[in-house]
Amino acid sequence: MRLVPGSLRARLLLAFTLGASAALMLCLVLLYVLLVRQLNAALDEDLTQRSHDLATAATQGDLGAVGRDPLAQLYAGDGTQISGSPALAGVRLLSVSEVRSFTGRRLVHRSLPGGAPARMLARRIRHGRVLAVAVSTHPAEAARHRLTWVLFLAAPGLVAVLTVAGWCVLRAALRPVRALTREASAISSLDTGRRLPSVPGDDEIAELARTLDAMLARLRVSFERERAFVDDAGHELRSPIAVLRGQLELALAATGHREEIERSLQASLAETDRLTRLAEDLLLLARERAGTLLLRREPLDLLDLAAAEARRLEPILGLRTDVTGDPVVVDADGDRLRQVLTNLAANSAAAGARALRLTISREPDEVTIEAADDGPGFAPGLLDSAFERFARGDTARTRGTPGAGLGLSIVRSVVAAHGGMVDAKNGPPLGGAVITIRLPA
C-alpha cells in the first residue's frame, strides 16, 4: 500500500498540512500552558496581597480582619488558633505540628470543606504567630477545563482552514505548471514554431518556463538542421543513383556494342565510388555525433604527412600545393588527418582555387595547420555556417568532388575528435579562403 501520494500537488499539500498541524498544535499547547500559568499567577498575586494586608492588620492588633477574610486563619506559636474565617469553622489549614515547625513562607495546596481544592499561602509574622491565607482553585480548574475543550474543538477546524488555504495557494502556484504541461504534451514534431505559454514574474516556475522555451528553441533549430540534412543527403544521393540507373540502362540497350557497354560500366563504377564516399562520410558524421568515432593514435610528423598528401593530391586535383613550416610530431590518427587534408584540398579545388598553401607551426600549447588558397573565398553569408553539413556556396557545388557538401563538416568532426578546434576566414596570405586547425600539442 502506497502511503505517499504520487501527485506533486498532493505531496506538497500533505507536507503543508502536516507541518501546519504540528505548528498549530505546538502553538495551542503553548497557549494553554501560558493561560494556565496566568491563572495561577493571578491566584498567587491575590494570596500575596491578602496575606500582606492581613499581616499588617494583625500586627496592629486588628484580629477581626482575619475573621472577615473569606479563607484565613491566625495561629499562635504553639499551634493554637487565634482567629479564623467562619467558612473554616472546625477545619484547620495548618496542623499544630506544622505551625510549630513552620519557618519563613510557604505556598502549598490544601482541600477545603467538601473536598474543594485550594491554594494556601502561610507566613510567620510578629510574636511568633503564623498566618495562613487560602483561595479556592475551583474557578481556575473550571476555566482550564473549558479552555481545553475549546482548544480541542477549535484545532480540527483550524487545521481544515489551513489545509483549504494551502490547497488554494498550491493550486494558484502550480496553475502555470499545469498550463505548461498541457501545452508541452500538445506540441508535436510538426509544430516547429509553437512556443510554451509565458509565465510572468521572476520566480522558479517562470524561470523553468523560460528555460523550457529556450530548450524548445534549440531543439527546433536542431530539428530544422536535421531535416535540412536529410533533404540535402537525399538530393546528393538522388543524382548519382539517377546517373547510375541511366548508365545501366544504356549498357543494357547497347547489346553487341562492347565499347559502349564498357563506357557505361566505367561511368557506373565512378558513380558507385561517389555513393560509397558519400555513405562513408555520412557514417563518419553519425559516429562523431554519437561519440563513437574511434581514433588510432600514433606519433606523426605533420610536416611529412602534409607533404606526402600534397604530392598525392596535386596531380589528381590540378592544384599547386606548397607545404611550409617546421617538423612537428603529434599523437594523432594518420588516416583521419589525411582525410582532413584531402577534404581541404578538394574544397579549394572545387571553389576554383589554383594554389594551396599548407603551413605547419608549433605554439606552446597547440599545433596549428593553416590551409590558405587563392580562390574566391567564402561567401559573406557562409562563413558562420561553413562547417555545417551541406552548407556550401553555389560555386562549391562541383559534381563529383570527394566529400562534396560534407568536406568541411568532416574536417570539424575529425578535429573535434582529436580535441582540437577549427575556424574559417577570408584573406591573406593568398587572398582566398583560410582554414585554421588547432590541435593539442
Image: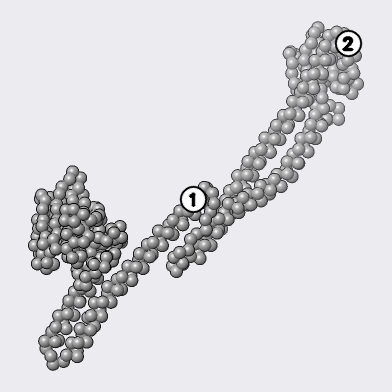
Q: Identify which residue, 386 or 294, lies in the foreground.
A: 386
Identify the secondary structure beneath mark 2: loop
Q: x and y percent of residue 57 in the render?
A: 85, 11
- Tell me if 337 is positioned left or right of 87 in this view: left
From the image, tell me which residue sits under label 2.
62
Q: Identify which residue, 225 or 293, lies in the foreground.
A: 225
Q: Quarter of the image holding residue 258?
A: bottom left
Q: Residue at x 34, y 68 (%)?
A: 228
Q: Residue at x 73, y 13 (%)?
A: 104
- Tell me if 414 is positioned left or right of 359 in this view: right
Which disc, if any, is residue 207?
1
* Amino acid type indicated by mark 1: Glu
* Amino acid type indicated by mark 2: Asp
Identify the secondary structure beneath mark 1: helix
Image height of 323 relative to 81, above or below: below
Q: Identify which residue, 380 or 382, lies in the foreground.
A: 380
Q: x and y percent of residue 16 in the render?
A: 60, 47
Image height of 38 relative to 27, above or below: above
Image height of 351 relative to 91, above or below: below
